[in-house]
Image (tube, rainbow, N blue to C red):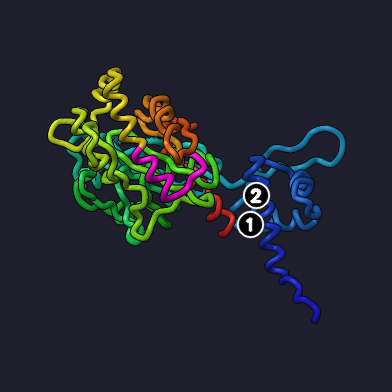
Amino acid sequence: MTPAKPSLDLLRSLTDEHVLRALLAERQLTRAQIAARTGISKPAVGDSVARLAEAGLLRDTGERTTGRGRVGTYYALADDLGTALVVSIGHDGAVAEAVDVFGEVLARHVEDLGRPVRPRKVSQALRKAAAQVAADAGPLRLAVVSAADPVDRATGKLVHLPDSPFLLGELSPADVLAPLVAGPVTVDNDVNWAARTEQAADDFAYLFLGEGLGCAVVADGEVRRGHAGFAGEIAHVLTRGPGGQAIAFIDVFADLGVRQPDSTTIDVEALRTAIKSDDLLDALAEAICGVLLALVTVSDPELIVLGGPWGPDVLDAVSDRFAQLPRNVPLRAPHATDSPALAGARDEAVRALRSAVLSP
């Protein structure tokens, strides 16, 4: 049986995709340069460029080749392909950025959230920040949100779990942003986005140690979110407390006296001061190792990244103690240290925006 030939429309669509990908990689090219980079014939590239220009996806830059031979016209992606909204909701405020298909930040706005944080205030700040970047950068085609709180996998809502130090109550970023964004709104928690920036291995864990506690488990190259989306919420994992008793990980910090007043939130500066004491550092390292042992036992990672504001501060002490346990894996500090959750969300926003451009 003779296999069916691909339709002309399919061939044209594939050619158009290759042309767009070439321009995503190189910013501007002539038709001859596109043909050389894609391996597609010059006539086919010429037809594709004409189609894409007519569809408003490409533009003539006005620049021409110089020198001997036929003059070539440089083409680039159109300027009005839209932007993607990237949002980070955390203790440092609501940060909104508009990025283009090349990953360049075209606009940025920050709204302070203050303390204590409440859903209504977050909604107002989120809406205001997104509206500002939309006004500065143009239409928003889609949005990616990083939140310092658990995210319900089915609904995309932020969920308040016991002892969560940040939002108090439920909030739906997708509902808040829907009037400002033409397409989908993707929401995940900040630790999962931070883990996506690491690409440490196909199987690793990312332990976040900051004002709150969190973990991302990466298996086969994918962040595992769990049935409800709460995988990695390790605050209540039982570990060894300062007195040798089994207690929840979050309660260790109460025993060590490094919580903020009337809160389960960890006082990062107080902790950094406290761990100058060898005894306290040893007690904290032992508690962290109990959590790491649980991670290794359950998820079998190749390595574990100790991230967050104070994770690298205790890395050496934890590594030394963890190496003595029967089951252990290498520990290391994160490669991305400058707003890693926002960076991970930004990478996803650019990928999704490019996908939207390639599939008009």
Dot 1 alpha-carbon crowd within 10 angstroms: few under 14, some 14 to 19, many 20 or more: few
Q: Which residue is mark 2?
A: 21
Q: CA distance from mark 2 to mark 1?
A: 18 Å
Badge 1 element? helix
Where does the C terminus fall, quadrant-wise?
bottom right
- Asked whether residue 275 appears in the rendered view, the answer is yes
- Asked whether residue 166 appears in the rendered view, the answer is no
Q: Residue furthest left?
A: 262
Magenta residues, as a range?
290-303
Of 339 and 136, nearer the camera is 339
Amino acid type, residue under disc 2 in the picture: Arg
Of helix, strand and loop, which mostly describes the magenta segment? helix
Q: Residue at x 32, y 52 (%)?
A: 151
Residue 158 % position (x, y) = 28, 51
Query: Mark on residue 54?
Result: 1
Q: Residue 286: name its quadrant.
A: top left
Amino acid type, residue under disc 1 in the picture: Glu
298 falls in the magenta region: yes
Q: Is residue 341 left or right of residue 265?
A: right
Badge 2 element? helix
Of 93 and 60, nearer the camera is 93
Which callout, 2 or 1, points to the residue nearer the camera? 2
296 falls in the magenta region: yes
Residue 122 % position (x, y) = 24, 44
Residue 152 % position (x, y) = 32, 56
Q: Residue 324: name its quadrant.
A: top left
Of 84 and 151, nearer the camera is 151
